[in-house]
Amino acid sequence: MPRPSNTEERRQQIVLGLLRVMSERGYERASVNEIAKAAGLSPGLVHYHFSDKQEILLVLVEQLAARARERVARRVARIAPEDARGKVEAFLDAFLATGADADPSAVAGWVTISAEAIRQPEVRDAYEQVVRADLEHLEGLVASVVGKRRARALSVGLFAAVQGYFVLSASAPGLVPSGSAAHTVKQMAAGLLDTATAKEGA
């Protein structure tokens, strides 16, 4: 396997530098100097590899989305093909469960990105693409349980709960009991799926 180029390594250092600063102080306070310091590089190298701070942020959106999708794919792949409910739970676990592969700085970074999506059209476009793809994935899993007609509304509600937990855990971490997010949202999902399935059968 070829070794990443020096340029790729430097760009990755810079993106992770932005994530570190942003998860602690927000995007507004993530100056190029602060990003460079967190990356262990000079500000000149940051300017050399990226045209501006927003370009770094857009790369970070792509990388966080890819990491989350890998986590989802790993967890869903462990579930038997015929266990449609198990796949919904695995999806929710991938986003909310704590454990060795949990990444609080990524959650904090994602919350900051969602706030920037309100202010910056380019970030909004990137954010919406990620959310749309993740929501479509969840909708497909939910549809396997309750059918297509009810899947969209249920999926949006569950995904909103996931995003709400992200905001709470990043903004007021003391409010969320450790390990409760995945358990609670999976209970919500079970109740919603049971109700929808009962209505389909009625």
Image (cartoon, rainbow, N blue to C red):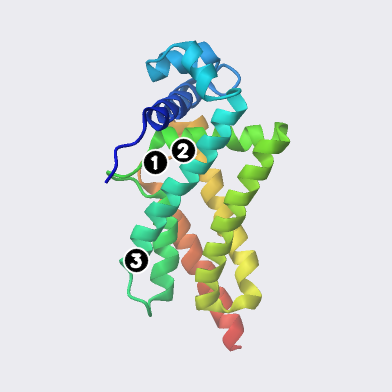
The x and y percentages for residue 40 are 37, 16
Q: Secondary structure at mark 2?
A: helix
- Label at residue 107: 2
> Mark on residue 191?
none
Task: Give the residue type at disc 1.
Answer: Pro
Mark earlier in primary sequence (1, 2)? 2
The residue under the point 42% across, 46% down is 67
Q: Position of residue 134 (x, y in %)?
A: 54, 56
Q: Which residue is mark 1?
A: 177
**Would you call the spot at circle 1 few (<14 residues within 10 Å), some (14-19), or many (20 or more)?**
few
Q: Disc 3 to disc 2, how far (Cα)?
A: 23 Å
Provide residue 104's location: percent of width, then percent of height: 40, 35
Residue annotated with mark 3: 77
Which-is-in-front pick, marks 1 and 2?
Answer: 2
Q: Residue at x 70, y 32 (%)?
A: 120
Q: Callout 2, which amino acid?
A: Val
- Select label 3 or label 2 by which is in front: 3
Total numbered circles: 3
- Most extreme residue toward the bottom, as rendered? 202
**Foreground of the two, 98 or 120:** 120
The answer to whether the residues at label 3 and label 2 have Cβ atoms under 8 Å apart is no
Residue 92: tell me if it is visible.
yes
User: Looking at the rendering, which quadrant does residue 77 occupy?
Assistant: bottom left
Query: Mark 1 and mark 3: span between their CA atoms?
Result: 28 Å
What residue is drawn where x is 58% and y is 76%?
Answer: 196
Q: Is residue 160 above or below residue 32?
A: below
Occupied quadrant, residue 82: bottom left
* Mark 3: secondary structure: helix
Q: Measure how far apart labels 1 and 2 are at the Cα level.
A: 16 Å
Q: Identity of the amino acid at label 3?
A: Ala
> In this picture, is 49 found above or below 178?
above
Image-quadrant location for residue 113:
top right
